[in-house]
Image: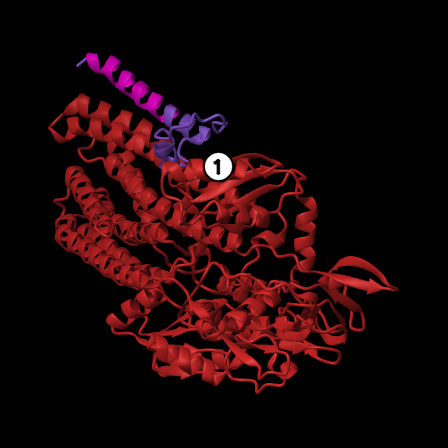
Chain colours: A purple, B red
Amino acid sequence: MDILVILIPVSLFLGALGLVGFFWLLRKGQFDDPDGDANRILRDDYDDHPKQ
Amino acid sequence: MTASLTHPRPAACPACNAAPAAEALAAKPVDARLMLSLPGIHCAGCISGVERALEGVAGVRAARVNLTLKRAAVEAGPEITAGDLVAVLERAGYEAHELDPGVLAATEADKGARDLLMRLAVAGFAMMNVMLLSVAVWSGAEGVTRDLMHWVSAAIVLPAIVFTGQPFYVNAWSALRAGRLNMDVPITLAILLAVATSLYETIMSGEHAYFDAAIALTFFLLAGRYLDYRTRATARSAAQELAALEVPRAIRLRDGVEETVGIADLAPGDVVLVRPGGRIPVDGTVTQGKSEIDRALMTGESLPAYAGPGSAVSAGEVNLTGPLRVEVTAAGKDSSLHRIADLVAIAESGRSRYTSLADQAAKLYAPGVHIMAALAAVGWYLYTFDLRISLNIAAAVLIITCPCALGLAVPAVTTAASGRLFRKGMLIKDGTAMERLAEVDTVVFDKTGTLTLGIPQPVGLEGLSDAQARVALALAQGSSHPLAQALAAGLAGREAEALDGLREVPGYGVEAMWNATPVRLGRAAWVGAEAPDVTATFLQIGDAEPVALTFTDSLRPGAREALDGLKRAGLRVMLISGDTRGAVRRFADEIGIEEVLAEALPAEKAARIAALSEDGAKVLMVGDGLNDTAALAAAHVSISPASALDAARVASDMVLLGKDLSPIADAFDTAVKARKRIRENFSIATVYNIVAVPFAVAGFATPLAAALAMSASSITVSLNALRLK
């Protein structure tokens, strides 16, 4: 069971990585307009002014 | 943020908060950020179309559509008004409405939602890890391994639960301080007791630790709280956005000099100038000028009224044809606008306080859970005289009964339902509006502007001779009066006669010379005809008998579908209007409404609604005018179209985003279904509790059982709510 000493921190680290990633996306406004983003990619014209 | 942007319902009177609104306006950056509501957009093509149309306007620097919220943010110079952009979009084929730039207040709400989402994410992260660690314990880890798992779980859960549970602790504490019990009290107690006993068990290397259950509980409850918050935040921001801050201003004439001042600065005796097309800002008497005024929004009359020196006019009416000078008799707090606001306040105080289904459930639930947990603890203590066992049992009972599913039961359904209504073009402003709508058994409609568009359309033009039609068209083209414009639009395609000396006689009509014959188009009295009880204008050629050109108000799209749908649902439908008896009666017959009340004053409308409520009816009021605001506030639940005056929109619980009325029938349908789902969810949660509680009380509950019961009930409840889509 010594392997747990490595595995538990590793799993916690990976989980935390996901959490930090989520925070980053949240702060970047990735969830502000999900429908719009889904549709924008289908447009023919090039998006000259992507949202900053 | 000034208080004006968060103004609650008293804004029924736009004039009352003119001063703070003006301050807010002054503080606005020069680089105007306009917000437009676009109820009709739904696809990638719409995004491109709207953005291209907006960016084609000179002065617009950037436009960005948000499809999820169905709105566009526009960065433009100060010379661009939202009205210009709305017109551009209408030409491009997109329905658009102005939103309050005070959406800044909505970002405030976003922060709250983001904060909850952050906590939810942390709770989810902690829950997943702890659940994984617990799998080892559930599958029979013993001794040091189990202790290790428990210690690691404790290390994750303790900080996580302190951070994520904060909304509940704060709520529970404020409820307890006020001497009340709410849903958060049993939640907080369960979390604290579970964590404390688990920590103790871990230290004593005990068998059962409920860290996983405690954090899972927090996670599910936060999910419910987040959904609830989002629904209410949309509601709040909708109220603010749609209450477009129409800063009422007036042009005051002082020693012949025009100056623009806020309404608050006017005093009785001042003279204000009202240009054609402008809204009259005060109550007063006309001192100079002749015109016609449109009272539709104030009284519901569809026929414009004459105004000349000596006529009394009141705030909110629209001046149609000629400039008027009005001597102020009452401004601000004393004006008729403000009296309507008072009516609204009275109507609201008379509205019975509605207890939401969730509150009803909480009232039964919170004391029940505490009593049960306490009884279990006392019973086990008396049986074993072991405090550790009895506290463990109490924690298990609290965790198992904890209103996970109850916390999700209502928010999950309202989120699904309001999302569905939003897609159909209806915004819900009030959290309990949906539940109240489900109880409705009587629907009262206003006529002008609600069931009709308030835009006249000429009828019987085929009856005119060719010459008459061509003269009428030429005359109508010379006036900006709504009837003249409607007539010109109705006769479009014909050729206009050449007329000489065309001039508009404000308050009466237009006249000109046609081949040396005087021709006139205007009011009945002016051409010497009998005034009919329908909207009409008269054409007189030379000395011939005047010809009546009658108009009908066009029906709002979807009105018939909405009425049919409501009638099919077995609701009693009524029409209350301030318009003349004949006009209302004829309209009601045409559209098939039997119960009619005409020539109703604003106070009468509200009184009628109150009388219906007293007889036990639950009334849905649909109206748009200032004269409807008191009735809207008095009704059990109310809806207004997007074109309604801001005062009416503020007073109502739901707002239609587009021109179409048909979502009303859908909304009722959805509300009834939503109420059914909420009840089902309560039943599901109760069944889970009834099954699980005996196990917990008997001491058979293991952390695994707690985790299973909680997750299963929460997931069932959420899935049931999603069926509403």
Q: Position of residue B636 (x, y in %)?
A: 40, 71
- For this view, does B549 lie left or right of residue B305? left
- For this view, does B363 lie left or right of residue B642? left
Q: Residue at x 38, y 37 (%)?
A: B45
Depicted B687 relative to depicted B92: above or below: below
User: Image quadrant of residue B611?
Assistant: bottom left
Magenta range is A2-20
Tell me which secondary structure the magenta stretch mostly adopts: helix
Q: Position of residue B638 (x, y in %)?
A: 42, 67
Q: Does the magenta-highlighted stretch encompass residue B702?
A: no
Q: Which amino acid type corresponds to the residue marked 1 in the rendered image? A: Glu
Q: How many marks?
A: 1
Taking the image as drawn, is residue B627 in sight?
yes
Q: Position of residue B477 (x, y in %)?
A: 60, 62
User: Image quadrant of residue B159?
Assistant: top left
Q: Residue at the front extreme?
A: B515
